[in-house]
């Protein structure tokens, strides 16, 4: 016996309208999902917040132009009225003023608002590239393992086991200096692109396994569905079966996983920068602002607040968005 | 005359693996074991047996979804049992399948139009007036509203979905349709409608059918010939009258006694209750596979597998595999093997 597909749980009213004629155009599962999503206030609110962060990241140069400052200039060093003799802002609340919206960075005296905007841009960009790479690799390997099966599947399965049980953060912390020694001469500075590229590669290498395992399981069960056999009986090629029969049924888990993966990678990137193996000065970075913040928080708590609250809002909103997307796709698991 | 489809000694074993960490083969599921069967051009053959006896496996072997372990599948005399996808290409359109589960047999992400025109796309068939026109015609043929072209499977009931599956099978103008329990997942009230549709199509289009069912009632009016399967083997095969009115194999008798409308005559019908379950196809009984549940079993049945032969007094083509066959009638003493069932 085969288990009826998830779509059997669709409301009976839809079936009834099919019987009685009605509009000739049907609603695809994707359209139904979008309708359910639009009716979910949490989902819509978190989508707006996430979109806001993305717009900030994209529009950083524009914001910088309108605001009239950049994240590199050390305003505190140039103007004596901003920092005291110990390097801390003279003004109250970390030097917040109509000129410096989020205050001034202790020590170097850079503008905090601009640092945060550009820091979000850096972290989001790295996380986004890593998410796309992770998702693509996960899709390809997951489908290959599930569809080809046999030895290939067994081999891929063991690689996934190893990767998922690997202490990846520890590995990155230990390996990043080694990599830098190999790639950069002692008298040169580490180029920014090298750090960015190695971060993306590390995050991707350790990230694809979870999605691949999930998709492999999905493909295994889809492969047994009779519509795949129906396609084979009519002479469909393996490529057609993968792209036309399997892939359209995998968009749900892929979309859910990547909306949950992106915030996870943003925090990973921030954590690695915080631990000193992420982005380096002077490139503004969300995680490194944290690092600096913990160094100065006893004297200037404001500097830690802005990146902290921003990251908190971002991660919570993105995770709520992921949950809403999942609920909209699969109304049965709604609590 | 050459049959359209001929199965010769067809056998399919599925490996059973076991062991911890290192998988190794510990046995075989003898799903189909040495089946000979022919389907003529335009002929309707019913294949009946309890669930798990290998009917679906046989159907999938005939449609070349599986490659046989031993034996041959001949289509118009051509051996297709090990043919590659490319070699099968010209034959694929002629052999189509209708599946058991109307929910898993249609891709939930494709519209009805895409589902039915897919086979034409794959085979490069461009009917006059285009794919959409042909799909609308097919929808009408199977009794659906052609305006539902752009709808998705979840908007249809089980019976309607099964009709979509039938339209898909018809899209390539097949010569043979293998219908694997096409109505057993449907409500009883809808089963008859779908069977009538298939019967009409069969008559109008002259398509040969291998119609799989798990009881004899469903195929009674549909099939010119009927084959009865038990644990991977055909135990009796013959024309409709021979099987329904003059069955010889004890298992056929048992199946018939479970069919409410089996006796046309007014004579009292024999009632048989089978004891126990179907034995495991991993370790099928020696000799005759039915002997663990057969009321006529003797020592010889355990030692010697009965060959599928024409018994004295049987019609041409009516073959039975039994050492001690029953009388050719559907009436007789009641047989109750398990006192608990009496
Ligand atoms: N792909 C498979 N792998 C392993 N065993 C299978 C497979 N398909 C079927 N079987 C086994 O083969 C036997 C016959 O199954 P099937 O042909 O589906 O029977 P039926 O259609 O008559 O119910 C069953 O015991 C089943 O468990
Ligand atoms: S061969 Fe023996 S066991 Fe098998 S059906 Fe005939 S009588 Fe029964
Ligand atoms: Mg079956």
Image (cartoon, grey):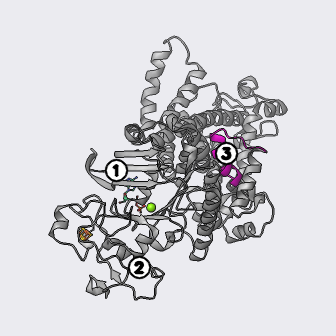
Ligand 3's image quarter is bottom left
The residue at which mark 3 appears reads as A310
Q: Residue B11 carries which label?
A: 1
Which residue is drawn at the image coordinates 35% and 46% (left, top)? B71
Query: Label 1: chain?
Result: B
- Viewer-nearest residue: B290 or A86: B290
Under tag 3, what secondary structure?
helix
Instruction: Write the start and end of the magenta stretch as one range.
Output: B109-128
Mark 3 to mark 1: distance in Å?
66 Å
Residue at 75% over, 62% down: B145
Q: In which quarter of the image is the C terminus of chain A?
A: bottom right
Q: How crowded is mark 3: few (under 14 residues within 10 Å), some or many (20 or more)?
A: some
Q: Name the residue under label 2.
A: B258
Magenta span contains residue B112: yes
Mark 1 or mark 2: name the one nearer the start of the chain: 1
Q: Distance between the residues labelled 1 and 2?
A: 29 Å
Relative to the observer, which residue lies in front, A301 or A52? Answer: A52
């Amino acid at each position: 016996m085969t288990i009826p597909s998830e779509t059997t749980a669709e409301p009976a009213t839809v079936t009834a309208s099919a019987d009685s004629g009605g509009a000739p155009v049907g609603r695809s599962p994707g359209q139904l999902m979008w309708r359910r999503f639009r009716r979910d206030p949490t989902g819509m609110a978190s989508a707006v917040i996430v979109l806001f962060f993305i717009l900030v990241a994209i529009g950083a140069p524009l914001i910088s132009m309108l605001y009239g400052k950049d994240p590199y200039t050390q305003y505190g060093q140039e103007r004596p009225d901003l920092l005291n003799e110990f390097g801390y802002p003279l003004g109250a609340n970390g030097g917040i003023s109509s000129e410096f919206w989020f205050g001034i960075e202790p020590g170097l005296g850079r503008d905090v608002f601009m640092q945060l905007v550009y820091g979000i841009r850096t972290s989001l960009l790295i996380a986004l590239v890593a998410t796309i790479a992770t998702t693509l690799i996960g899709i390809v390997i997951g489908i290959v393992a599930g569809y080809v099966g046999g030895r290939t599947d067994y081999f891929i399965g063991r690689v996934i086991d190893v990767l998922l049980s690997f202490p990846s953060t520890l590995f990155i912390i230990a390996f990043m200096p080694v990599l830098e020694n190999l790639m950069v001469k002692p008298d040169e500075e580490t180029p920014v692109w090298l750090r960015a590229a190695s971060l993306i590669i590390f995050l991707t290498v350790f990230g694809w396994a979870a999605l691949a395992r999930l998709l492999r399981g999905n493909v295994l069960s889809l492969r047994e569905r009779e519509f795949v056999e129906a396609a084979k009986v009519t002479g469909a090629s393996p490529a057609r079966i993968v792209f036309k029969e399997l892939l359209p049924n995998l968009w749900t888990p892929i979309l859910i996983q990547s909306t949950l993966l992106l915030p996870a990678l943003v925090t990973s990137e921030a954590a690695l920068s915080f631990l000193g193996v992420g982005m380096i000065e002077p490139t503004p970075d969300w995680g490194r602002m944290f690092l600096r913040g913990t160094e100065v928080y006893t004297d200037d708590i404001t500097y830690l607040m802005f990146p902290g609250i921003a990251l908190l809002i971002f991660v919570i909103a993105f995770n709520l968005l992921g949950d809403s997307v999942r609920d909209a796709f699969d109304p049965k698991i709604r609590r | 005359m050459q049959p359209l489809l001929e199965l010769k000694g067809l056998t399919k074993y599925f490996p059973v693996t076991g062991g911890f960490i290192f998988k190794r083969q510990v046995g075989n599921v003898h799903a189909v074991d040495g089946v000979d069967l022919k389907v003529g051009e335009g002929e309707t053959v019913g294949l009946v047996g309890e669930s798990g006896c290998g009917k679906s496996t046989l159907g999938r072997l005939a449609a070349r979804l599986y490659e046989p372990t031993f034996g041959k599948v001949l289509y118009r005399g051509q051996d297709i049992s090990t043919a590659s996808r490319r070699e099968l290409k010209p034959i694929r359109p002629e052999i189509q399948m209708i599946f058991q589960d109307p929910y898993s047999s249609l891709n939930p992400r494709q519209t009805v139009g895409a589902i039915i025109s897919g086979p034409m796309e794959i085979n490069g068939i461009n009917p006059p007036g285009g794919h959409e026109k042909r799909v609308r015609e097919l929808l009408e043929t199977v009794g659906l509203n052609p305006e539902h072209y752009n709808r998705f499977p979840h908007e249809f009931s089980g019976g309607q979905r099964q009709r979509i599956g039938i339209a898909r099978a018809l899209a390539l103008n097949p010569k043979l349709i293998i219908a694997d329990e096409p109505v057993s997942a449907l409500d009883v009230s809808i089963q008859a409608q779908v069977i009538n549709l298939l019967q009409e199509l069969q008559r109008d289009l002259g398509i040969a059918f291998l119609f799989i069912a798990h009881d004899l009632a469903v195929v009674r009016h549909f099939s010119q010939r009927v084959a009865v399967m038990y644990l991977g083997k055909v135990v009796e095969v013959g024309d409709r009258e021979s099987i329904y009115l003059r069955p010889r194999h004890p298992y056929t008798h048992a199946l018939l006694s479970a069919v409410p409308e089996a006796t046309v005559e007014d004579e009292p019908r024999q009632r048989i209750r089978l004891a126990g379950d179907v034995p495991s196809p991993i370790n099928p009984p020696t000799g005759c596979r039915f002997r663990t549940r057969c009321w006529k079993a003797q020592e010889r049945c355990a030692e010697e597998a009965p060959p599928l032969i024409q018994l004295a007094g049987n019609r041409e083509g009516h073959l039975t595999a039994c050492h001690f066959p029953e009388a050719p009638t559907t009436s007789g003493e009641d047989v109750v093997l398990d006192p608990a069932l009496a």
